[in-house]
Amino acid sequence: MLSLSPDALATLLPLGILFAALLMFGGGLVWARYRDRQTLIQDILIQIEPWAGSRAAAWAWYQTYPIAALGGLTAEQLIARGKADEVTAYIAHIRQGGYA
């Protein structure tokens, strides 16, 4: 078994605690980002559902419909690329009677 001096332990213990705290904090950030993305997707589906006809149809639109005004990408692709604001602006434009 490896034996460490008290000085080495005094140095390694705070570093170990710091490393553990960083891992926990980083995991929390990942979870928060995932939760925010899931909330955003649900909000978009709620907005689309009235004109899509059902939640299933809204989900299909979200995943498969290429939005010509946004480069022919789907809402899912745009959100994955960090362009959620463009998707929500497009949906708001449609809800206000604008053309798709």
Image: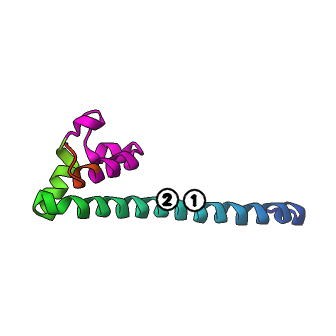
Q: Is residue 37 above or below residue 76?
A: below
Which residue is painted at 28% across and 49% down in the image?
Answer: 93
Find residue 71 and report its image quarter. top left
Compared across the picture, whether 63 is left or right of 29 comes to left
Q: Is residue 58 above or below residue 87?
A: below
The residue tagged 1 is 26
Residue 30 numbered mark, or none: 2
Crowding at mark 1 (Cα within 10 Å: few <14, some 14-19, many 20+): few
Task: Say which amino acid is labelled 1.
Answer: Gly
Magenta range is 66-92
Residue 39 pos. (x, y %): 36, 64
Describe the element under mark 2 as helix, strand or loop: helix
Percent position (x, y) of residue 59?
19, 56
Q: Are marks 1 and 2 in contact (CB under 8 Å)?
A: yes
Query: Picture quarter containing residue 65?
Result: top left
Drawn side of residue 30 relative to residue 3, left or right:
left
Q: Nearer the viewer, residue 24 or 50?
A: 50
